[in-house]
């Protein structure tokens, strides 16, 4: 897939993901989105993935007349987000948009915020469903798991030892993808053996060190799957200047801006992701629709999400952005996030 250079990268990404601009306006029956206050709470600060999702949140808020403030912890530990949730509730913000570091550890804090009238949207990494009004999911967990297995299998010739370098040990999103990858490996990839799963905590240095340790402990390792943008970038950086370059495949989920140099230098053949800017944009549109009373989060509710068009709430209060997209040498220059 190729795009002309006159297209803005964000637009190119939207087109690549099969999403069309629509420009429709909020026509719901609620009180309007103007002056709605939204707190954006990523897993941790300093991760370019979440910087992109917050940029999408700000874009949506600008269109809606709402305001967004991003806050968050430095580390992606299970309950590090609790004080930020408490503060948002005390401030009486209309909606909280959060990527959870743990499915339950922030549950009580979220419930208190909801009792105080704040709508809660999880995006990227969910909590258990009872703690939030909606989950804006980037792609189906099965689709994300399958895509990463296809990539690693292709890159190691369908056989050999692989390891997983994940984010934090409690992350809802990575753990769901890993569980599905384990199941699918057992049923569909009999010649690939998952020898170890390690956790880099979405911290660059920890992920880098865990990569080194994996390669030392498993001399026959043929590939590393890292379902986190922080992990895959750190693994690729380690491998790119090591004896393993060209011998050990690195794939998983990455941002094009962080991975470009490793695709161009041949360390990485291909990896996947969705558009995190669109994800933040959609989550903010959903939060504003809830806050304005246009939707309640019931299955079947529909809302207009600006340039992304209309979305419908599915089972368990889930809204789906789209499908994962594969980046490789042929298209990586076309993206800027
Ligand atoms: C990291 C985070 C995020 C995840 C991406 C793929 O940025 O762990 O939650 O969705 O990777």
Image: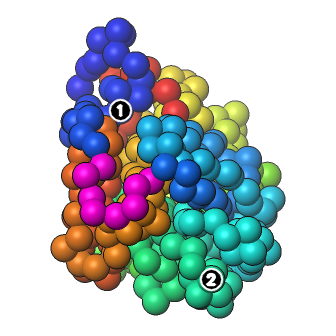
Which secondary structure type mostly characterizes the magenta part of the structure?
loop
Say what secondary structure mark 1 lies in: helix
The local crowd at label 2, few if under 14, some if 14 to 19, many if 20 or more residues have their Cα within 10 Å, is some
Q: Residue drawn 58% across and 26% down?
A: 261
The local crowd at label 1, few if under 14, some if 14 to 19, many if 20 or more residues have their Cα within 10 Å, is many
Q: Residue drawn 44% across and 44% down?
A: 64
Range of residues picked out in magenta: 26-33
Q: Earlier in the sequence, mark 1 or mark 2?
A: 1
Q: Quadrant of residue 144?
A: bottom left
Q: Position of residue 9 (x, y in %)?
A: 42, 23
Q: Is residue 86 left or right of residue 29?
A: right
Asked if residue 38 can be seen in this view, the reply is yes
Asked if residue 195 can be seen in this view, the reply is no
Q: Position of residue 267 (x, y in %)?
A: 54, 34
Number of numbered markers: 2
Q: Is 125 a magenta residue?
A: no
Q: Which residue is mark 1?
A: 13
Please state which of the two labelled residues, at mark 1 or mark 2, is closer to the viewer. 2
223 or 220, which is in the foreground? 223
Say what secondary structure mark 2 lies in: loop
Q: Which residue is mark 2?
A: 116
Q: CA distance from mark 1 to mark 2?
A: 38 Å
Mark number, residue 221:
none
5 or 166, which is in the foreground? 5
Q: Is 31 a magenta residue?
A: yes
Q: Position of residue 334 (x, y in %)?
A: 39, 22
Q: Residue drawn 35% across and 32% down?
A: 13
């Amino acid at each position: 897939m190729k795009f002309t250079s006159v297209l803005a990268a964000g637009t190119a990404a939207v087109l690549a993901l099969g999403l069309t601009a629509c420009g429709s306006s909020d026509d719901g029956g609620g009180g309007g989105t103007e002056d709605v206050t939204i707190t954006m709470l990523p897993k941790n600060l300093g991760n370019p993935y979440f910087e992109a999702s917050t940029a999408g949140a700000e874009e949506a808020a600008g269109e809606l007349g709402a305001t967004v403030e991003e806050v968050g912890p430095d580390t992606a530990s299970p309950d590090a987000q609790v004080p930020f949730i408490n503060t948002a509730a005390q401030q009486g913000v209309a909606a909280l948009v959060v990527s959870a570091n743990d499915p339950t550890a922030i549950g009580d804090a979220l419930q208190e915020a909801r009792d105080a009238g704040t709508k809660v949207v999880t995006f990227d990494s969910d909590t258990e469903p009872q703690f939030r009004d909606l989950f804006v999911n980037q792609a189906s967990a099965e689709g994300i798991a399958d895509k990463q297995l296809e990539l690693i299998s292709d890159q190691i010739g369908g056989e050999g030892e692989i390891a997983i370098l994940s984010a934090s040990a409690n992350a809802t999103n990575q753990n769901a993808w890993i569980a599905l990858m384990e199941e699918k490996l057992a049923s569909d990839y009999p010649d690939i053996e998952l020898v170890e799963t390690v956790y880099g905590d979405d911290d660059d240095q920890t992920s880098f060190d865990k990569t080194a340790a994996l390669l030392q402990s498993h001399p026959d390792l043929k590939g590393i799957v890292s379902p986190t943008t922080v992990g895959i970038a750190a693994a690729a950086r380690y491998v790119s200047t090591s004896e393993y370059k060209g011998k050990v495949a690195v794939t998983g989920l990455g941002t094009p801006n962080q991975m470009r140099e490793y695709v161009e230098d041949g360390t990485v053949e291909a990896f996947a992701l969705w558009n995190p800017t669109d994800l933040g944009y959609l989550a903010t549109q959903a939060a504003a629709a809830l806050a304005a009373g246009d939707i309640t989060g019931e299955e079947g509710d529909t809302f207009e999400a600006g340039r992304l068009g209309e979305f419908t709430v599915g089972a368990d209060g889930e809204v789906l952005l789209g499908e994962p997209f594969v980046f490789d040498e042929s298209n990586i220059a076309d993206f800027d996030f």
